[in-house]
Amino acid sequence: MNKLLSTFTILTLLIPHASYAKVDKDVNVARVQAILAELCYQPGIVDGAWGKKTETAVKAFFAKHYRKYDGNFDASDANFILSAGASAKAFGSASVKKCEVIYNARVRDSLKNAKIKQIIQKVSKKQVDISKTDQDEVSYLKNQNIQQIMYADARSGYKFVERNVPKRDAFKMVQHEGFPAARIQLSIDMGGARDDWIRDGISGYGQRFEYGQTKQRAHNFNKEIWTRIVFWLPENTRSFEQTTLFDLKEIRNNQTFGPLLNLAIRDDGGGSILKIKHNFEKNDCIIGRDGSGDNSFCDKTDVNLTIGPIKKYTGRWVEFSSRSIWSNKSDGAYDAWIDNKKIIGHRGNTSFGADRIAFKFGLYRIGLNKSENPDDVRIYFSKVGTAKSCKAVGIENCDKLMKSLDVVGTPGASRVFRTDVKQKTEFLEAGGLVLKKF
């Protein structure tokens, strides 16, 4: 079962597309059939042709996973089923029932030839990967404590996030480009914590490795707080969905909401970009009963700031600096700079009911099951800290930053757009049980 995805990946375009009129021509029916067969939905022989058995199997799969089937089958429907393969890979054959897959002769021959080609490619890639690993191993630090990169107030009150993938796979302290750095990397093979990995009954959604403030040591309100984070992204870094580098979350009566603001990599249609998203304009939340647990539901406005193409921020150290005054009133403030260039200057509410704001950094990526083969991602962090003043957190050009405090708006954004999110409204309309209002 652990080889399920790789087997299906090499069912190439040599296999004919669907002839059934309601199936999109770009769907590789053989791959869909193979997954359904492996998961015991009985689509018949894997032959690449859409028929009654295949459609019956699709209907059964969708019914079990609460997805509507309208008689049309497109690429998004196929990807929905492909994510079941990610589930088998992440959790292993012990948790997924396995059935025999029967291929017709033509498909079996195509699979055999493609697999030989894949083995050659994998051997070549492994040789390159080994070379890269050897370079990193030379720069591993004897002291593997992340405190080496933490500054000022960030030297205490932080911990590794409970939902992280295994530390031995994702985290190393290394010497990188002149500085001690926390190297964090994520691969689809690492899986993820259940609450990240599975969404709407489908696996392969998200994974993370993060380090952040405890609730007890989170930022207090109505005080000036400076934050600094220096990071290095390798060249060719990209993210089709979203990969978050750091975020700030509201804490309301010991319940975590958010993120209130994050810095992330995402493809919004024109290639991977670096962007900021915040909810300073509206963030109206409740706590409600969701199944057996309690969750937050918010009506909010996501304000998205495109900073620039990600290639402008790869292959070098990048410094992100910010100044915040957290407030539930109009006297709040948030200013941020990248490499001393002002990105945003906000005045007004920076919260709508919180009593503390928690900061964390690392890698958190979502929407992985929307891509067939998500890239591995790696980042290096150094000089991370928070303090009550600019100089105390180690920023060298404080005078330049202070001179730009009067600049408000989004001077460093190439694009700004807003999205309304109505989680609270939809929860209430569905008859959800409200446990607390703010």
Image: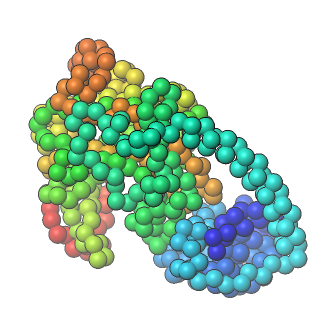
Q: In this view, does 282 lie above or below 14?
A: above
Q: Can residue 414 be seen in this view?
A: no
Q: Residue sitting at 19 percent across and 70 percent down?
A: 434
Q: Which residue occupies 47% across, 45% down?
A: 172
**Closer-to-camera residue (190/325):** 190
Of the pair 400 and 31, the residue shown nearer to us: 400
Residue 249 against residue 307 in the figure, above or below: below
Q: Residue at x 51, y 27 (%)?
A: 177
Rendered image coloring scheme: rainbow
Q: Where is residue 326 in the image (x, y as percent from the top left)?
A: 17, 39
Say left or right for 124 vs 134.
Answer: right
Q: Where is residue 84 in the image (x, y as percent from the top left)?
A: 58, 71
State whether residue 174 is above or below residue 317. Answer: below
Give the residue at x 24% y 18%: 402
The quarter holding residue 290 reads: bottom left
Judge by depth and name the residue closer to the eye, 82 or 229: 229
User: Could you say where residue 429 lies in the image, as x and y percent from the top left?
Assistant: 28, 69
User: Which quadrant would the C terminus be assigned to in this image?
Assistant: bottom left
